[in-house]
Image (cartoon, helix red, strand yellow):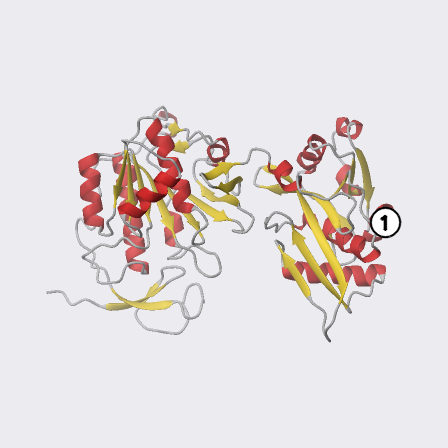
Amino acid sequence: MVKQKSVWVCNECGNKQFKWTGSCNICKNWDTLTEELEVPEKQGRFESKTPRTVKPVLIEEVDTKSFKRVNTGYREFDRLMGGGIVEGSLNLIGGEPGIGKSTMLLQLAKRFADQGLTVLYVCGEESAEQTSLRARRLDIKSDRIYLFSETSFSAIRAQVEKLHPDVLIVDSVQIVYKTELSSAPGSVTQVREIAMECMHLAKGNGITTFLIGHVTKSGDLAGPRVLEHIVDTVLEFEGDRQHGYRLMRSIKNRFGPTDDVALFQMEEKGLSEILNPSLTFLEERMTGSPGSVIIPTIEGTRALLIEVQALVAPTSFATSTRRSTGLDQKRLTLLLAVLEKRMGYQLHALDVFVSIAGGMKITEPAIDLGIILAIASCYCNKPIPSDTVVMGEVGLGGEVRSIPRIESRIKEAINMGFKRCILSTKNFKGLNKKLTEKIHLQGVTRVEEAIKLLLG
């Protein structure tokens, strides 16, 4: 018998090394090395691999007519995937526990079954009875959806060969294991091998496959980074459970646009798509309230209108509090320093709270000017006009910088009925003149100008 060697595998990047060194030699992360037995390289390592003869072909001679997409019936989800789900693709969906991953895939399974496709749902983390109860609660009934509660990949592969499904759903990839590997389910070796097996199943047999993945404390997908390289599409579920909104973000997509988003709402009968997110986020807005500003932001290919709320209050402690929800805490500290320096506001003795209404998380710097105006509005106790939107990036010198895709933001503001827009003067260059006829555009170059313009 061949003696198995022990190796140390990095949980982040999948790097192998024969000695424990505290940190990974490749990604330099600490405490990410776990000891595992090395997988022997042998002939026919992957069970699902189908032998075929491949030869080089000219790029103009490649047959793309067999490249088919399946529409799910969810307009937002189909747009996120680039026009539908490609047959034989391998898709990974990640998110926090309880965010709605299994619910979403059960609803997608129902849409596939309604089109005459056979679906095999592998519910490894739950029993078939638990998954069936959830399906009944969601009013999902079909004679083409098969539930299979199993964690051994050999048994799953046997059922795939028996049923020949069109769609395979694995919930989750961290719970499925191969018996010939000595490492525990969810380890780096097991996750990598299971992902490769699912890839061979999807590509070799033309089975559209969905994998549900766990996430770490930091919100990243659990398992080695190679997992994201193997799959065709990586989707992330985000959202606040208290609000009920779910944001599905496309991190990787080989068949469509990346960094695009689709918005859903969790209801009693499952997830429903939101076709007009701007209207949803603004329907509970109170006009005439100090500290509230509407900002056009870009998520993927779509422009959204969001409400930024700020509250400035006297502190009761020796040190003031700075809290933010939906935006970067460090960015808020920087903008407060700009306000104190350029406007002379005494914010060091005040508590400052800033929040993105609706549970959204915004990272782009185009919301800087809106955040500053929201804080200044609450500080001066003067409301921003309700028919005004604000956008612009703010530098350390207090200057208002230009932002990309300005026309998409202005068009969304026009569609929602806003009459006035505050933006950087540099964004007027190359702007379509027809937009100026529908909305009043006012350019500013510094933070002081914007505050005096709106707050007097």
Of all residues, the one furthest to the top in this rendering is 65
> What residue is shown at x 22% (from left), y 52% (from top)?
152
Quick one: which residue is furthest to the bottom in this view? 318
- Amino acid residing under circle 1: Leu
- Figure label count: 1
Q: Is residue 51 visible?
A: no
Task: Spot the residue most to the left.
Answer: 1
In the shown orientation, is residue 279 left or right of residue 29?
right
Judging from the image, what secondary structure is the residue with disc 1 in? helix
Q: Is residue 382 left or right of residue 205?
A: right
Asked if 419 appears above or below 294 in the picture, the reply is above
Query: Is residue 411 among what the camera can see?
Result: yes
Quarter residue 414 falls in: top right
Q: Position of residue 440 (x, y in %)?
A: 81, 34
Q: Which residue is at 20% across, 51% downward?
A: 45
The answer to whether 317 appears left or right of 234 in the picture is right
Q: Which residue is mark 1?
A: 455
Between 21 and 133, the one nearer to me in the picture: 133
380 shown above or below 28: above
- Quadrant holding the N terminus: bottom left
